[in-house]
Image (cartoon, grey):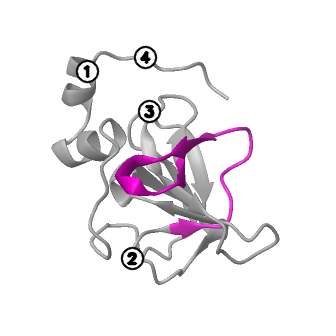
Amino acid sequence: MAEKLNLSEAEWRERLTPEQYRVLRQAGTERAFTGKYEKNKQTGEYVCAGCGQPLFESDDKFESGSGWPSFTRPAEGGSVEEHRDTAHGMVRTEVVCARCEGHLGHVFPDGPGPDGLRYCINSAALDFKPEES
């Protein structure tokens, strides 16, 4: 894993679009079925829109019907961290980028695969790098 990235709020605002800033730095959520990667079926790698840290692989993406890109597991190497989230009167597990601590989304225990997890991630928190042919 890369060294932690610590920027000032002014530097984050300069680096990110307003929607990326709202999601990554203020723990916002994009509306369901509106994100640019929700229906993406290309092969490649999803990286943090804030710092470029590899987060998820397309092989681990699945159609959950939730309206957000969903993955069964994060990329290798400790790319994400999980924290207890009690905001909005709910108890959930927040997923953040391990490098820049940007809010990505949440993980739920209702997914397919060997671990039964669904990493429900905001498209605004991601950039996609297609696999080179």
- Name above or below for residue 59 compared with residue 112: above
Per the rendering, the mark at residue 6 is 4
Residue 78 on the magenta span: yes
Q: Nearer the viewer, mark 3 or mark 1?
A: 1
Find disc 2 in the rendering and name its residue: 67
- Residue type beneath disc 1: Glu
Which callout, 3 or 2, points at the residue further toward the start of the chain?
3
Find disc 1 in the rendering and name its residue: 9
Q: CA distance from mark 4 to mark 2?
A: 31 Å
- Name above or below for residue 117 compared with residue 67: above
Image coords of residue 69 (percent x, y): 47, 68
Find disc 3 in the rendering and name its residue: 51
Residue visible at 58% across and 33% down in the picture = 98
- Residue type beneath disc 2: Gly
Relative placement, left or right, of 9 versus 58 is left
Residue visible at 39% across and 48% down in the picture = 87
- Name above or below for residue 11 compared with residue 81: above
* Near-viewer residue (114 or 82): 82
Per the rendering, the mark at residue 68 is none
Magenta range: 70-94
Which callout, 4 or 2, points at the residue further toward the start of the chain?
4
Q: CA distance from mark 3 to mark 1?
A: 14 Å
Say what secondary structure mark 4 lies in.
loop
Which callout, 4 or 3, points at the residue further toward the start of the chain?
4
- Residue type beneath disc 4: Asn
Quadrant location, the C terminus = bottom right
